[in-house]
Image (tube, coloured by chain):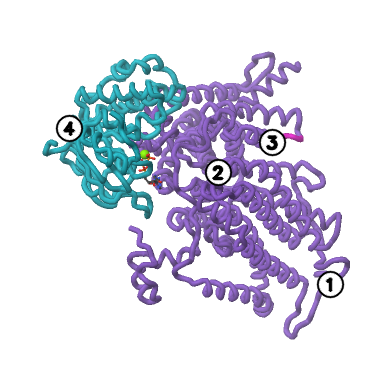
Chain colours: A cyan, B purple
């Protein structure tokens, strides 16, 4: 791993009200890599992403992004630093058209960076360009996922965080999403990926963190983790076929 | 005039009124859609628009109207933005109830300011002379000003639509009304847009006020008379839907106008009947897509609590002491000649009972009943009617009042409790307004005069006390009928409190409280949440009816004003002021509110303003009510340690907030 990761999380403690969900999480995302965070339901993966973004305020620990301490920043400010989140359940704006969903994404993100045009982004997603004027609500699940990714990409983020992008999608669509993420990485994007689908996660990622009960219990390059049957079984209850 | 022209004229009249409603409802709906704020003060902003224009146009003469039409809405817009910045903003993330409360306080403030500047009576606001002439079209003469309203209103509505749908501002507003948090996550500071949105909605209301003010006249009640129809329109059309506001506004304008001409009996009723019908069939309204606005706020209702500082024994002692004082007051009043204090106490006791009844649904079942005066008023009518036609016995009258109100509560609850939150609030408000308007229509309810001149008998079947004949000399003073009335009232109120307390401590109350904590969990455990809420509503309706019945029996009259929505607002204020969810808190709140109103109104003219300001401060800073004050003080970082040292409260028991 490079000495100076783009994102660096140290001792992150966070939760809701008096419940502590994260009990000191450490993780690094080097520039240009895909790092995945996997774990069972409810172990705190989403909470980790939300704490990085600032929609949940960390109680302790630090988040450093591109050399800047962003621990205490609000989500608006964090997004302005160049972190984009593709959230769980996509959360596109159902009453806005595809174009508008992307336009509004383009209003966000860093102010001092060149952003692709809405047209250019729509053009990159075949299944969106057919529906530019449809309302978000009219799209299929896979299309909505693509739209959520497009909305994030148009802000030209330095770090893209994806929360379970393949959840609830048909296997063929999962493949499409997977290809899209790989393609983005090939183009140089830095990605922090939360996935339930361990197979997909291990396929895409360079480096893996396994989260359990609010702590990182195992980490390593993805091929090593993929081979560690016993660990996968213990923390995820799965075995990955190869 | 031919039938066709007569109808055409009605259509035009309907469109004129409808346009005013469209402008009013559009702002209300946008504000709700984007910020989840139910803005009761919208009607007062509407009135402010009219009065500002009145004040600007008057001195300027000729072109004054046109200057006013531009400047007044801008002023109202600025006031709207200030309101958002200074007050509304502080409550984002809390339950929408707090916005209802806050804006209700603002109604009192703005309305009082209007009357103190411009007086209480209506004033003519002449339309500009260029527009003050008839136009012959469709075979009849019709005012150019009215055509102007229709054209100008359409243009403004179109402009608003373009703003919402064709501009960046509009796009962000629409996105925010769907998912506020996601807009923030993209890096967009939506709070700035809130202020603008509030200002914009306020300015639209201001325009509507000017248009209507010049069509009729300007009066301090113009705000409170349009706010309820405006809510109906927003609910009919679908909360947060601009299209709904436009269609609903025009529709209600037309329906009202036609009803006035062709079915006068239904005027004032039909709109509420429609609203109830629509909500029962389609709770999201005609064009609404979802229930509620953009954010899933976790902000629950904040309950009063005195725990941690006052032990329950201390509180019980205070309770006994309070009842003890109430028992001896008449003697002192008699001795000192301040008999007036007994009348005040009777008022307080009745409002305390009313607030207690509301607390059962608001504080324990988490249901925001915005129309609770429905039961108070119906109870009063039922008891007076019983006294007049059935029996002079106050016991019979009260029994009937309770039974009738419980039955109505059952019916209303049956229709409305499956839709929760804001819709429940609106349906209860709709029913209350329906009854309010209905009592004007019938002879047996006495129309706008109400019913008066009943005498009561405290007993049954001839056994009991007739207060007119009751007189017991007791040394220096005489016990008379007034005393009987007072003690009877005191007994009923204390009895109702004990009953409510029993109910809350029974398994029924425990379930209610677990529903209040987490509805999901309660239904998961297997409780029929809806059934429990309905039962609480029935009990609450019965008790509110008892309060109304008592008032009517005591004072020997009932009037339509018993059903006016202001009462519903005031009783909510009392409940929250005292601390909901505690039973004794709301009663305390009623005491403080009624006494403050009574005392303030006899010393200062602007008492509404003072109450409004105090209340707004309370909603913002002491949302848990008066009963929470001891704890709040104990938790204060500066005072806390001192009190803790003195009272020996352990550090760990008092959670620090920073
Ligand atoms: N808004 C919230 N308020 C209170 N508790 C929450 C909230 N959101 C999540 N939690 C709790 O925090 C814990 C961690 O949730 P989180 O969403 O981070 O898990 P996750 O790993 O993303 O799970 P999943 O795989 O189901 O998405 C869970 O126990 C959850 O119930
Ligand atoms: Mg998750």
**Between marks 3 and 2 in the image, the one whose residue lies nearer the viewer:** 2
Q: For the residue carrying disc 4, how many other residues have a C-alpha within 10 Å: few (<14), some (14-19), or many (20+)?
A: some
Residue occupying the point 20% across, 44% down: A69
C-alpha span from label 2 to label 1? 50 Å
Residue B421 circle label: 2
Residue occupying the point 44% across, 44% down: B297
C-alpha span from label 3 to label 4? 63 Å
**Between marks 2 and 1 in the image, the one whose residue lies nearer the viewer:** 2
C-alpha span from label 4 to label 2? 47 Å
Chain ID, mark 4: A
C-alpha span from label 1 to label 3? 47 Å
Query: Magenta segment, which residues?
Result: B265-270
**Which one is nearer the viewer's eye here, B125 or B254?**
B254
Residue position marked by numbered label 3 in the rendering: B273
Residue B155: within the magenta? Answer: no
Chain ID, mark 1: B
Residue position marked by numbered label 1 in the rendering: B469
**Residue B589 can be seen, yes or no:** no
Q: For the residue carrying disc 2, how many other residues have a C-alpha within 10 Å: few (<14), some (14-19), or many (20+)?
A: some
Same chain letter for marks 3 and 2: yes
Asked if the residue at tag 2 contacts the one at tag 3, i.e. Cβ–Cβ closer than 8 Å, the answer is: no
């Amino acid at each position: 791993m490079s000495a100076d990761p783009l994102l660096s999380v140290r001792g992150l403690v966070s939760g809701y009200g008096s419940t502590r969900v994260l009990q000191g999480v450490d993780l690094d995302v080097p520039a240009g890599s895909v790092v995945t965070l996997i774990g069972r339901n409810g172990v705190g993966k989403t909470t980790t992403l939300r704490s990085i973004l600032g929609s949940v305020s960390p109680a302790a620990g630090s988040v450093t992004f591109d050399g800047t301490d962003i621990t205490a920043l609000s989500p608006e400010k964090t997004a302005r630093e160049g972190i984009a989140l593709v959230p769980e359940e996509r959360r596109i704006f159902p009453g806005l058209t595809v174009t508008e969903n992307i336009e509004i994404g383009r209003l966000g993100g860093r102010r001092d960076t060149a952003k692709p045009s809405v047209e250019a982004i729509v053009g990159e997603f075949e299944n969106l360009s057919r529906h530019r004027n449809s309302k978000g609500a009219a799209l299929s699940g896979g299309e909505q996922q693509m739209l959520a990714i497009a909305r994030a990409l148009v802000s030209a983020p330095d770090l893209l965080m994806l929360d379970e992008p393949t959840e609830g999608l048909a296997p063929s669509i999962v493949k499409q999403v997977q290809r899209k993420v790989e393609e983005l990485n090939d183009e140089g994007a830095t990605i922090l990926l939360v996935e339930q689908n361990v197979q997909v996660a291990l396929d895409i990622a360079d480096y893996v963190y396994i989260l359990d009960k609010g702590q990182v219990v195992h980490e390593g390059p993805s091929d090593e983790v993929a081979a560690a049957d016993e660990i996968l079984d213990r923390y995820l209850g799965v075995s990955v076929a190869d | 005039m031919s039938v066709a022209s007569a109808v055409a004229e009605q259509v035009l009249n309907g469109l004129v009124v409808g346009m005013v409603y469209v402008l009013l409802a559009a702002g209300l709906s946008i504000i709700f859609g984007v910020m989840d704020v139910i803005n009761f003060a919208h009607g007062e902003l509407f009135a402010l628009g009219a009065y500002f224009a009145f004040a600007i146009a008057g001195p300027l003469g000729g072109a004054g109207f046109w200057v006013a039409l531009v400047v007044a809405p801008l002023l109202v817009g600025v006031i709207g933005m200030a309101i958002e910045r200074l007050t509304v903003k502080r409550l984002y993330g809390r339950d929408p109830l707090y916005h209802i409360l806050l804006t209700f306080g603002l109604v009192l403030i703005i309305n009082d300011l209007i009357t103190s500047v411009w007086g209480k009576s209506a004033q003519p606001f002449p339309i500009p002379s260029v527009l003050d002439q008839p136009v012959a079209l469709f075979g009849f003469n019709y005012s150019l000003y009215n055509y102007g309203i229709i054209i100008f209103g359409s243009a403004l509505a179109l402009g608003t639509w373009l703003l919402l749908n064709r501009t960046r501002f509009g796009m962000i507003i629409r996105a925010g009304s769907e998912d506020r948090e996601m807009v923030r996550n993209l890096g967009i500071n939506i709070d700035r847009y809130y202020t603008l949105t509030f200002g914009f909605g306020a300015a639209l209301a201001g325009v509507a006020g000017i248009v209507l003010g010049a069509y009729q006249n300007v009066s301090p009640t113009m705000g409170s008379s349009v706010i309820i129809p405006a809510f109906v329109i927003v609910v009919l059309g679908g909360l947060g839907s601009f299209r709904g506001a436009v269609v609903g506004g025009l529709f209600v304008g037309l329906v009202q106008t036609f009803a006035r001409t062709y079915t006068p009996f239904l005027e004032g009723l039909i709109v509420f009947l429609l609203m109830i019908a629509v909500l029962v069939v389609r709770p999201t309204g005609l064009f609404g897509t979802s229930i509620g606005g953009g954010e899933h706020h976790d902000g629950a209702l904040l309950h009063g609590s005195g725990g941690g500082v006052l032990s329950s024994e201390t509180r019980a002692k205070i309770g006994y002491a309070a009842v003890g004082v109430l028992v001896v007051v008449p003697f002192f009043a008699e001795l000192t000649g301040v008999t007036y204090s007994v009348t005040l106490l009777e008022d307080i006791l009745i409002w305390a009972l009313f607030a207690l009844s509301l607390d059962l649904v608001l504080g324990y079942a988490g249901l925001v009943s915005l129309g609770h005066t429905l039961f108070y008023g119906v109870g009063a009518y039922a008891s007076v009617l019983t006294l007049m036609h059935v029996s002079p016995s106050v016991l019979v009258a009260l029994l009937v009042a309770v039974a009738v109100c419980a039955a109505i509560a059952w019916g209303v609850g049956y229709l409305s409790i499956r839709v929760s939150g804001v819709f429940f609030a609106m349906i209860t408000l709709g029913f209350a307004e329906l009854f309010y308007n209905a009592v004007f229509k019938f002879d047996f309810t006495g129309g706008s005069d109400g019913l008066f001149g009943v005498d009561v008998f405290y007993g049954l079947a001839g056994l009991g006390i007739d207060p007119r004949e009751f007189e017991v000399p007791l040394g220096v003073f005489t016990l008379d009928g007034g005393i009987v009335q007072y003690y009877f009232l005191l007994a009923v109120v204390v009895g109702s409190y004990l009953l409510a307390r029993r109910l809350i401590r029974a398994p029924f109350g425990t379930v209610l409280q677990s529903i209040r904590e987490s509805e999901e969990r309660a239904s998961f455990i297997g409780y029929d949440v809806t059934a429990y809420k309905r039962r609480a509503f029935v009990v609450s309706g019965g008790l509110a009816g008892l309060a109304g019945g008592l008032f009517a029996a005591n004072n020997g009259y009932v009037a339509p004003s018993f059903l006016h929505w202001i009462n519903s607002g005031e009783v909510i204020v009392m409940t929250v002021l005292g601390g909901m969810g505690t039973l004794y808190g709301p009663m305390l709140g009623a005491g403080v509110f009624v006494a403050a109103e009574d005392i303030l109104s006899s010393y200062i003219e602007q008492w509404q303003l003072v109450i409004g300001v105090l209340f707004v401060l309370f909603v913002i800073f002491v949302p848990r009510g008066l009963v929470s004050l001891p704890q709040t003080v104990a938790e204060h970082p500066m005072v806390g340690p001192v009190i803790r040292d003195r009272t020996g409260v352990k550090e760990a028991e008092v959670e620090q907030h920073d």
